[in-house]
Structure formats: C-alpha cells, structure tokens
Amino acid sequence: MKRISIHLLTNVLLMLVGILLIIFYTIPDVLQWVAVVIGVLFLLPSMAYLVAVALRKAEVRSQSDMLGILPAVGGMCFGVIMIVKPYLFENVITLLLGVLMVILGLFHIIYLMLSWRTLSVKGWYLFAPIVVLASGVAVLALAGVRDNAALVALLTGVSLLLFNFTSMQEYLAERRLRHEASREQMGETAVQPAEEATDKSENDIVI
C-alpha cells in the first residue's frame, strides 16, 4: 500500500481552503468564521486527547500522558475563546494570512531561481508566486487592504490556488527531468552489453 505524500496532502488542503475562501469571501465577517474554524481545530484534538487520557486506566497512564494534559487544556480553552469571541482574533488572522502569502510566494520564487537551469524553468513560472508575494505585502503594508476582510479573504483564496498551480508546474518539470534521466540511464545500460559482446568476440578472434 502506497503512503500518502505529506506534500501532496498539504497542497490538496491548501487548494480546498483557497476554493472555500473564494466562494464565501463575501460573507459578512468572513475572517471571524476563519477564526471559528481555527478554534474548532484547536478544540477537537485537545478534547479527544483529554478524553483518551481520562478513559485510560491509572496504571497504564505514562508520565508523558500526564504532561500532555496541560497543553491540551490550554488548546481547548484557546479554541473555546476563538469560537465564542472570534472578533478578538480578526486582526491577528489578517496579519497571519498576510505573512502566509509572503512565505508561500518567497518559497516558490527562491525554489524556481535555484532550479532555473536544472528544471529548465520558463520565465512565466514566476508570475504566480510574484502575485502571491505582492498580495501578502499588500495585506501587511496597506491599511485599506488590511481593513477589508472580504478582500483579504479573496486575496488569500486566490493566492492558495496560485500556490498550487506553481507546485503543479514544478512537479511536472521535475517529473520530466526524471524521465529524461531514466531514458539516458537505460540507453547507457543498453550500450554496455553491446560493447561487452564486441570485446568478447574480439578476444575470441585473438585466441
């Protein structure tokens, strides 16, 4: 059974988040809903951990289980606060989304520049990550953009889709490079037996 690639899973999740943000960016207080979702992601794993520890027999509980209770309680309380009062985190989430876009854009720009010759990167490959980077900078630097929750959500959704588009282009380029390398290797292995056969026949003639 093949293992699921963490890289592929991350890209699929980011793509789904991007699609949802593009679809629902016009919802009033959309970033507060993002805060609620993040709160749920904090709450559910923390509750599951606490329930698992509580149901475990006392003699079976390890010291690491007991040490994990404090962070789990903290994560549960933080999740509850984000769910009950999401408006408190709207500005923080805006900044986090801006930073996320900057990181994603820089990641692909740096990777493409380092792989320019190896992968035969074309200039238009840089268009999407530059747009992602510019969107992040706009959210962080421009108050007019930062204060518009709908625009921030839309820019984030588009940026996540562009991130996936660039990831796909890089994957196809890497795959093409691997195929070319495998064909060259197969060609070399095919030539070697022919050369060995020629050498053997020459030796037979000499003898």
Image (spheres, rainbow, N blue to C red):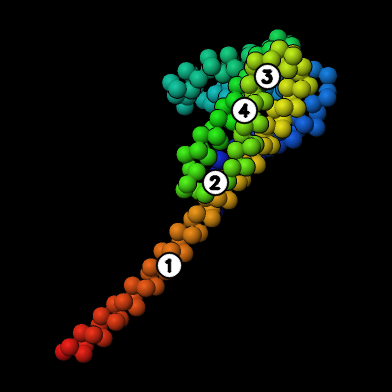
Q: Which residue is mark 2?
A: 121
Residue sitting at 16 percent across and 89 percent down? Answer: 207
User: Which label sits on residue 139?
Assistant: 3
User: Which label sits on residue 186?
Assistant: 1
Closer to the N terminus: mark 3 or mark 4? 4
Tell me if label 1 and label 2 are in contact, CB under 8 Å.
no
Residue sitting at 25 percent across and 82 percent down? Answer: 200
Closer to the N terminus: mark 2 or mark 3? 2
- Residue closest to the eye, 101 or 91: 101
Q: CA distance from mark 1 to mark 3?
A: 51 Å
| Residue 82 percent across, percent down from the top left | 69, 15
Q: CA distance from mark 3 to mark 4?
A: 10 Å
Q: Of helix, strand and loop, which one carries label 3?
A: helix
Question: Outermost residue toward the front?
Answer: 123
Mark whose residue sits in front, 4 or 1: 4
- Residue closest to the eye, 14 or 180: 180
Closer to the N terminus: mark 4 or mark 2? 2
Instruction: Give the quarter of the image for residue 5.
Output: top right
Closer to the N terminus: mark 4 or mark 1? 4
Q: At label 1, which amino acid type do we have?
A: Met
Instruction: Give the quarter of the image for residue 15.
Output: top right
User: Which label sits on residue 133?
Assistant: 4
